[in-house]
Amino acid sequence: MQLQQLRYFATLAEVRHFTRAAEVLHVAQPSLSQQIRALERELGAELFQRARGNITLTDAGEALLPSARQILADTETARREVQEVAQLRRGRVRLGAPPSLCASLVPDVLRAYHARYPGIELVVDEGGSQDLVRTLAGGGLDLALVITPLAVGAPALATTELLREDLVVVTAPGEPPPTRRRALRVADLEGLPMVMFRRGYDLREITTAACRAAGFEPSFTVEGGEMDAVLGFVRAGLGLAVVPGMVAARSGLRVTPFEGTRMRRTVALAHRKDVAPPRAARELRAVLLEHLGLGEEAE
């Protein structure tokens, strides 16, 4: 008994017509008839009652049909599982992430993933959350690290919260500190020269909103840069900047925390709700959760 014969049998049992079944299977009708007869000889029973324009299953055919369908389904499942294993030997994962995370979290995660799956090509799209959400929704990314909550009107995405990160102030070591206290308040930023990220950048929106909530507009000496540029401007003494704690720890700049937990951001991993990520992307998600000490049940 061959899988091809079972496939021919199941198709003929569904359409009940040799010519139409042959068209569905993209084979010549004589070949279909020969395979059905060969299957009947092997089983020692007729599977179809043949009459002009009318084909019905015999009792033997009715008995075989559920098993045939199960065998074909199991075969397809096995084929897909083998393909997914093969995909982890070669393939590609497209990850989007803000520049701040590309400079802190992402390199360590990608190093661990590459060590485990060296055949997978890693493509990183660096940008702000708003840009990444649009690219993800358009199918240009498999996964994206984004800052939540997402903007109103964002496309339907499934998100998993990963971490809540403190934001801090960085200044050049040779410049006066922004405060003589160990920590500062958002109100202490009023009137101080600030280096600010470009428009659409999550950290710009968070910082500006916090300053306005404290009753003042921030004062920018330089604006419009990405993470590396902003840190360079701060290092040159052009002003202070509000950046994530993980970035600040690697910057070599003076770090001043905020009082309490008023300045934080929430980082989440997102993918489209209507399309399941490929196996290689799901494994990257698992490595990311493992790196952060989170279980698969993380929400």
Image (tube, grey):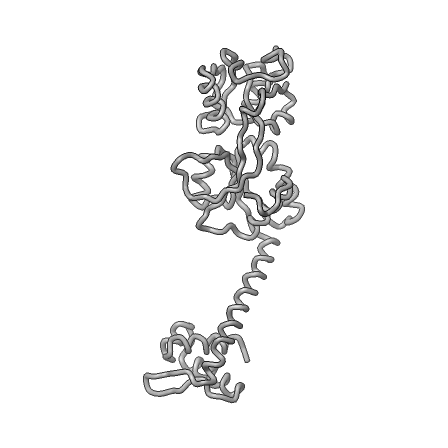
Q: Report the residue at 43% width, 75% height from top.
A: 11
Q: Residue furthest left?
A: 53
Q: Position of residue 211 (x, y in %)?
A: 47, 19
Left or right, 165 with reference to 275 = right
Residue 95 appears anywhere in the view: yes
Residue at left 53%, top 86%? 43
Q: On the picture, is 165 further left or further right than 37?
A: right
Residue 198 position within the rendered picture, expressed as x and y whole percent measured from the top left:
47, 25
Q: Is residue 162 above or below residue 183?
A: below
Q: Which quadrant of the rendered structure holds the N terminus?
A: bottom right
Horizontal placement of 20 versus 264: left or right?
left
- Residue 270: percent from left, percent from top: 50, 42
Would residue 175 be visible to someone looking at this image?
A: no
Q: Residue at x 52, y 27 (%)?
A: 226
Residue 263 is situated, as x and y percent measured from the top left of the image, at 54, 24
- Which residue is nearer to you in this view: 189 or 284? 189
Query: Which quarter of the rendered picture does the C terminus lie within?
Result: top right
Report the number of numbered marks: 0
Instruction: Residue at 42% x, 44% y: name it.
Output: 156
Return the residue found at the far front.
260
